[in-house]
Amino acid sequence: MSRIIAAVDNSAAAHPVVAAALRLAPVFGADVECVHVAAVEGRTAAAAAAGSGVPFRTIPGDPLGRLLALAAEDDVVGFAIGQRSRVAAAATGHLALGLADSVDKPVLVVPPRAVVPDRFGRVLIAMAGVPGRTRDLKRAIALAASADLELVAVHVDDESSVPSFSDQVQYETEAYAEEFLARYAPGAPDVRLELRIGAPVDQILAACAEERPDVIAMGWPHADKPNRGEVVRAVLERSPVPVLLVATR
């Protein structure tokens, strides 16, 4: 059986991390294991696992190094981790992003005060600009579609990059939506595309407030580029719901 690793610290934030891992597990057909990387077992961390009936273990050592070792195991298919966990060794300053930087497996980043529902029912797939590679979007859609989730793809752009088909705004919007879905989400007719114009972070969070998803899915770029992942970082800081980071290149 495959595993989702719920990486927890010894704080109250461990509870939503474990809960989110349990909601993510059916997407992968996986079980959940709770892991606390520390010199001694934390009571709060252990209680979070015990309260949900999830296996728990404490592993001593460097948090990032230990999680990367787990990521290398074939039966580990993803992670859930708290948003505020930090480790000095991670260049990003966040243990969650340090992990996402180094693995191709999805990483669910959970806000410390997230209210996790009984199940994940709706996923907001957030994109700023046109993806460089269609597999980035397809991978997120495939994960969600396999679990029978409602999908809303939010594409944020500026006016200059939206193609003009006519002088009728309604026709332009519908035609652009059809073209976009045909190109980036073929074979996924149940995806609903929400087109937005403006600042990506603000528009993604506005869509989150309106659509009320249980989780936001975003691409996390592994390529070393200027301002890499700045939209994702800003969304992570402000999102009220867990954010699933899917590796892109």
Image (cartoon, rainbow, N blue to C red):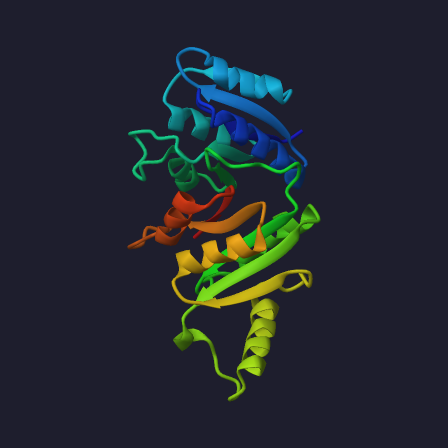
> Residue at the location (61% across, 19% down)?
51
> Residue at the location (46% across, 16% down)?
59
| Residue 200 falls in image quadrant | bottom left
In-image side of 143 versus 114 (left or right)? right
Residue situated furthest top in the rendering: 40
In this rendered view, identify the residue nearer to me: 153 or 168.
168
> Residue at the location (53% across, 31% down)?
16
Above or below, comparing residue 225 to residue 101 in the picture: below
Q: Is residue 58 visible?
A: yes
Q: Position of residue 199 (x, y in %)?
A: 38, 62
Numbered-mark total:
0
Above or below, comparing residue 190 to residue 121 in the picture: below
In-image side of 219 versus 179 (left or right)? left
Q: Position of residue 84 (x, y in %)?
A: 39, 33
In which quadrant will I find the N terminus? top right
Residue situated furthest bottom in the rendering: 167
In this rendered view, identify the residue nearer to me: 61 or 217.
217
Q: Position of residue 45 (x, y in %)?
A: 49, 19
Q: Position of residue 219 (x, y in %)?
A: 47, 51
In-image side of 134 versus 54 (left or right)? left
Q: Is residue 139 visible?
A: no
Above or below, comparing residue 99 to residue 211 in the picture: above
> Residue at the location (44% across, 30% down)?
68
Residue situated furthest right in the rendering: 148
